[in-house]
Image: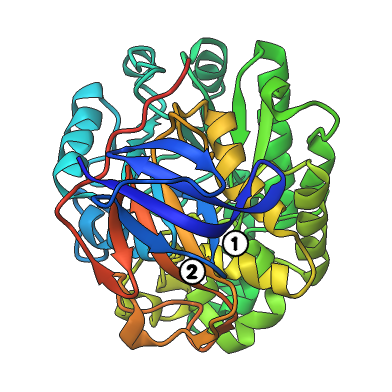
Amino acid sequence: MMKTLIRKAHIVNEGEIFQGDVLIDGEIIQQTGKDISVSSDVEVIEAEGLYLLPGVIDDQVHFRDPGLTYKADIYTESKAAVAGGVTSFMDMPNTVPNTLTQELLEEKYQSAAEKSLANFSFYMGASNDNLEEILKTDPRKVCGIKVFMGSSTGNMLVDDDKTLEGIFSKAPTLVAVHCEDEATVQKNYAEYHARFGDEATAEIHPLIRSSEACYLSSSKAVKLARKNNTRLHILHLSTAAEMELFDNKLPLEEKKITAEVCVHHLWFSDEDYARKGNFIKWNPAVKTPADRKALFESLLNGKIDVVATDHAPHTFEEKSRAYFQAPSGGPMVQHSLTAMLEFYHKGEITLEQVVEKMCHNPAILFRVEKRGFIRKGYFADLVLVNLHDRWTVEKEGLYYKCGWSPMEGETFSSRVKTTFVNGHKVFEDGKFDESNKGKRLMFNR
C-alpha cells in the first residue's frame, strides 16, 4: 500500500503543539518526528502553516439508517462527517426497527462496512424487556449499551425500575444514557399544550424539557451506577445543576462515571429560540446562558470529559412544522470541529483541549483500539486544518441529506482541509475519494 509523508505540520497531540512530520504506511502511522527522509515513491504533503490533529471520534450520532433514510443515511452522513474532520462515529439504536437484538445490531455493522466513509460503531439498544439480548453484547466489538431514561425521537423509553436495575448491574460493557425524567416532561407537556396549543413556539421547549427533568434523571442514573459499580456515561448534559454529579479529581482512565456535552449546548442558548425556532429544538433542550457557561466551565475543569454532536437530522419540512408537531434533533457532524475551533479563536479553549475532548478522551473513555492519538502503530486517522481560512456556512456547501444546518449563516475562522481515515485520503479541499470505506471500531476491554 502507498506511503504518505505529511511534512512540517503543526502537530497537536497529547498536550503539545510542535512542528513535525508524520509518515503513513498503508493504514498505519509508521513514524512521527522531524525531517523524516523518504524515497521518491512516497507521496509528500507539504503542510507548513497547517495544523495536524487526530481524527475526531464522535460518540453520539443518529444516522437514521435503517428505516428513516429519507432524513439521512450512513453514506451521506459519514460523508458530512469526514468533511468536518470526524473520522469515527458511534451510532444510536433508535432506528426502524429499533436495534434491540444482536441480529439487528450486526445487520447495521454489515451495512456500514459497505457504505461508511468513516470508521463506525453501533450501540446495542435497551428496552423494558430485552435484557437477555443486552447480555450477549460483545464488549470487544460494540461501543456500549444505550438506555433512554426519557423518551425522545423514536421512543425507546426504559422506565421499569427492575429492568434498569438489571441493566446497571449486569451490562457487559459501558452503559450510555439519555437522562430526562419522563413524568416531569409529560406533566410539563400537558400544561404547556393546554396553555398554548398550536400557537406554541420553541421558546417553551426548555420549560417542558426542564432542568428539573434532567437533574432528576441524571441523579437517578448516577445513584444506580454507584450502587451497581456500573461503567456509566451520561450523554448530552445541558444544565448547571447536573454538574455537581461529576468528579474532576480522578484521571479519566479511573473514572467509572463519565460525562459528555454536545456542541449545540455550548454554542446556543434559549436566547436563540426567537431566531432559530425548531431548528435548535433538541432533547435535552438548549437552556439558559448560565447553563451554557457552567457546561463550558465543567468541560475545561474536567467534570465533562468529551464533546460530541448528537447529530440527528430531520427534513426541513418536519422542522418547519408547528412546535408541538416538529421533531427534536438536528445535523452537526460537518461543523463540530470548526465550531470548537471558533471557541479557540475567541480565547475560550486551547487547541490542546479541543483535541483532548474530541479525540483523545473518547478513545480513552471507550477504550478504542489504536485510535484517537497521533502515535506510531496507531491507525492514521488524521485531520489537516487551516486555522486561518474564514468561510460562512451556506446551504450549497452542506453534505447532509436533510440539506439544512442550524449553523447556516455562521462564519468560522478555521477550515478542514484534508481528512485521512485509516491512512486513506478520503477528503481534500471539498473533494472526496470514496474508493476505501471505514472500519469497525474495536475496543480494548
Query: Relative to 405, is 194 on the left or the right?
Result: right
Q: Residue at x 76, y 69 (%)?
A: 288
Q: Position of residue 228 (x, y in %)?
A: 65, 12
The residue closer to the viewer here, 324 or 389, is 389
Secondary structure beneath label 2: loop
- What residue did someone put label 2 on? 335
What quarter of the picture does the N terminus occupy? top left
Vertical placement of residue 32 versus 83, above or below: above
Vertical placement of residue 439 versus 389, above or below: above
Instruction: Give the label on residue 263, or none.
Output: 1
Q: Amino acid at mark 1?
A: Val
Q: Amino acid at mark 2?
A: His
The answer to whether any part of residue 305 appears in the image is yes
Q: Position of residue 307 (x, y in %)?
A: 61, 51
Q: Position of residue 171 (x, y in %)?
A: 48, 15
Q: Crowding near pointer 2: few (<14 within 10 Å), some, many (20+)? A: many
